[in-house]
């Protein structure tokens, strides 16, 4: 199904816990990218990407955005001239109603 079916949260959050077993691990593995050892004043610009809507993001969407941003920054700024950190963590499990397709 397309992502627009699961864009907004309906009801309570459904985290992975001992009651909710059998959930795969999130796809995103790397949260810090670029020059991780740079001091706070070594890089001239600080940017924050903030969503104005309360929506749920899948771990696949976070991983795809991380890959795209990393590729753009490496091509334009160089490998050691930026530091990117993903601060959100996909705790909420998206419950997808899978249909049988023949």
Image (spheres, grey):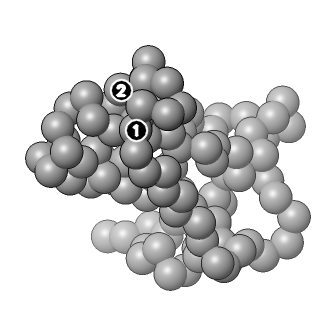
Q: Residue 56 location, x and y as percent?
A: 63, 66
Mark 1 and mark 2 lie on one chain; the one further toward the N terminus is 2
Q: Are marks 1 and 2 in contact (CB under 8 Å)?
A: yes
State left or right for residue 8 relative to residue 70.
right
Residue behind mark 1 = 43
Is the residue 73 above or below the residue 97 in the image? above
| Number of numbered discs visible in the structure rendering | 2
Q: Quadrant of the N terminus?
A: bottom left
Q: Residue 52 location, x and y as percent?
A: 64, 78
Is the residue 35 above or below the residue 52 in the image? above
Is the residue 2 above or below the residue 25 in the image? below
Determine which quarter of the picture holds residue 95.
bottom right
Q: Find the distance from the CA under tag 1 to the CA under tag 2.
A: 10 Å
* Residue 33 seen in the current view: no
Residue farthest toward the top in the current orientation of the protein: 37
Residue behind mark 2 = 35
Identify the mark at residue 60; answer none if there is no mark: none
Q: Residues within 10 Å of mark 2 (few under 14, many from 20)?
A: some
């Amino acid at each position: 199904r397309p992502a627009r079916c699961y864009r907004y949260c309906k009801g309570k959050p459904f985290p992975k816990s001992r009651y909710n077993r059998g959930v795969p691990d999130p796809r995103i593995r790397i949260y810090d990218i670029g020059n991780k050892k740079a001091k706070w004043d070594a890089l001239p610009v600080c940017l924050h990407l903030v969503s104005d809507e309360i929506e749920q993001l899948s771990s696949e969407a976070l991983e795809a955005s991380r890959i795209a941003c990393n590729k753009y920054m490496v091509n334009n700024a160089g490998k050691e001239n930026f530091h990117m950190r993903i601060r959100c963590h996909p705790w909420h499990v998206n419950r997808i109603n899978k249909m049988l397709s023949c």
